[in-house]
Amino acid sequence: MNLRKLNATLHRDIGYLAVGLTVVYALSGIAINHIADWNPNYRKTEQALQIEPLDIRLSQQELTESACRQLGLPLPRAAFQPNENTLQLIYGGQAGRTFGVDLPTGKVIMQESQPRPVLYALNRLHLNAPKKLWTYIADLYSVSLLFLAISGLFIVRGKNGIIGRGAWLTSIGILIPASYWVWWINR
């Protein structure tokens, strides 16, 4: 088997192997790139509730017990008062729930965070949360992408290959991140 045929065969087969991880990193990358616009890991909901006003002169423990009783909730994992008129009740679990109680009015804002089933998992992989074996899988994937990029340059021959049209497109592909990097460090 000649070198060109071996290159094309390896490029094809490694490309097939890389598809699954490419989808994971692509979807997660888009989600993470827009983290300033939305939370790609959690869906947050908010609900207004009402209880009887609570006397701000009570101890935090008494306020917590009274608020939980009126809301029909068990005691929270944690409670604190960021100021004398507010009580925060924090519950853990899969759906992180917090209750912000305005003591003088009895207005309660319940906030709940639910993991986005697919994106949460993809983002955890993308950011290498599992560590250990996943680090080596991600490194192998990165090496595979380098191989695919370089081997792909030599698959097409002639005027559309790397010595013709491919050279221009490759140059543009290199200039885009290089130009942005130069602009970014000099801004």
Image (cartoon, rainbow, N blue to C red):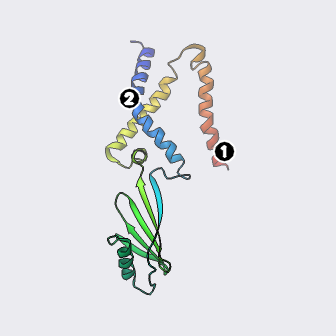
78 relative position to 83: left or right? left
Q: Which residue is mark 1?
A: 183
- Residue 46 lies, in percent from the top left, at 48, 61
User: What residue lies at 43% left-to-right and 19% top-to-bottom?
Assistant: 7
Residue 102's tag is none
Say what secondary structure mark 1 lies in. Answer: helix
Please state the total of marks drawn on the protein image: 2
Q: Residue furthest bottom?
A: 57
Residue 111: x, y in percent?
Answer: 45, 63
Q: Which residue is mark 2?
A: 17
Residue 47 position, x and y percent, is: 47, 63
Q: Which residue is at the front of the view, 6 or 52? A: 52
Considering only vertical position in the picture, is 12 above or below 182?
above
Q: Amino acid at mark 2?
A: Leu
Amino acid carrying label 1: it is: Trp
Give the residue at x 62% y 20%: 165
**In this picture, residue 170 sits left or right of residue 109:** right
Name the secondary structure under disc 2.
Answer: helix
The local crowd at label 1, few if under 14, some if 14 to 19, many if 20 or more residues have their Cα within 10 Å, is: few
Relative to 147, residue 34 above or below: below
In the rendered image, residue 150, in percent from the top left (x then y), is placed at 49, 27
Q: Measuring 42% from the left and 75% from the top, which residue is drawn there?
A: 80
Between 23 and 143, the residue placed more toward the observer is 23
